[in-house]
Image (cartoon, rainbow, N blue to C red):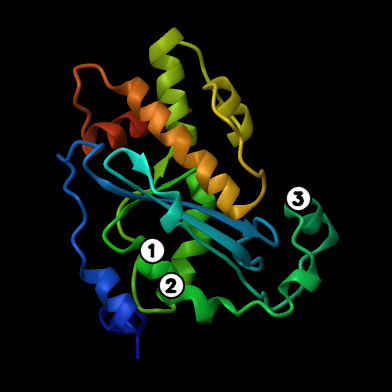
Amino acid sequence: MSLRDRLRRPATRAAAVYAHAPLDGLGTDWRAASWAVIDLELTGLDSRRDEIIALGVVPVDGGRIHAGDALYRIVHPSRPPSRASVEVHGIRPADLESAPAMDAVVDELLEALTGRRLVAHAAFVERAFLAPVLRARGVRLRGEILDTQLLARAWAAERTGERAEGLQLDALAHRLGLPVHRAHHALGDALTTAQVFLALASHLEHDGALSVRALLGDQARARGRA
């Protein structure tokens, strides 16, 4: 069966629901939209050989973070993480011994993402690692991921005309006067990113309304300035 055929036939019920659930329209006010803020911890940054070892997803509805409905899972990789990787996120091989493989948690991840637009910090990383995981379930990643790193550029340019390049998540949170939750922990970083997203979107509002389309437009213009 070709890849195209597999993508037309979701492998599980969760994948089928994810593939067909409606997303909020581009004209929806961002506060009325449903979002899923996601963070991944990895064995490295090469999506061809590195793997996801932890994931955190925080739902945002009605402009509010619903931390009680967050998802956090650690994932057993096919190869143990390197020492350099452990030094970043603190997840040791022993911590992963009894963890399920990625295939066992994909449906849970899909349920957390269903019907929601995605938010991440430095979203190219999440995109690169999520896409093959979802392809294995016969679905594609839906919608453009809203990147808080790019939104920070848009906010800085609008506020002072300055360039805000390469802001790490914790530095951006401090700049916005926000707390940093447990750094380099998938759920902690997802919570911090969710707070950053709400703050940036609020700062980018002017006339009391800001649509999903407008946020994506701000992101596109910030990307163009890079």
Which residue, given by chain and number where applicable, does mark 2 sit on? Answer: 108
In the rendered structure, the answer to whether residue 134 lies left or right of residue 184 reads: left
Q: Quadrant of residue 217?
A: top left
How far apart are labels 2 and 1 at the CA level?
6 Å
Tell me, yes or no, whether the two marked residues, 3 and 2, touch with CB atoms within 8 Å. no
Q: CA distance from mark 3 to mark 1?
A: 26 Å
Label 2 environment density (alpha carbons within 10 Å; few <14, some 14–19, many ≥20):
some
> Marks 2 and 1: CB-CB under 8 Å?
yes
In the current view of this chain or complex, which residue is farthest to the right?
83
Q: Nearer the viewer, mark 3 or mark 1?
A: 1
- The span from disc 3 to disc 2 (Cα, nearest Å) is 26 Å
Residue found at the far front of this picture: 68
The kind of residue on which mark 1 rests is: Ala
x%, y% of residue 21? Answer: 21, 66
Which SS class for mark 2?
Answer: helix
Q: Residues within 10 Å of mark 3 (few under 14, many from 20)?
A: some
Instruction: Identify the disc placed on residue 88.
Output: 3
> Which of marks 2 and 3 precedes in the sequence?
3
Give the residue number, with chain letter if any, for mark 1.
Answer: 112
Which residue is outermost to the bottom? 1
Callout 1 secondary element = helix
Q: Is residue 47 above or below residue 165?
A: below
Choose between 129 and 65: the one closer to the eye. 65
**Is any atom of residue 136 visible in this view?**
yes
x, y (%) of residue 14?
A: 33, 77
Circle nearer the viewer, 3 or 2: 2
Q: Residue at x 79, y 65 (%)?
A: 92
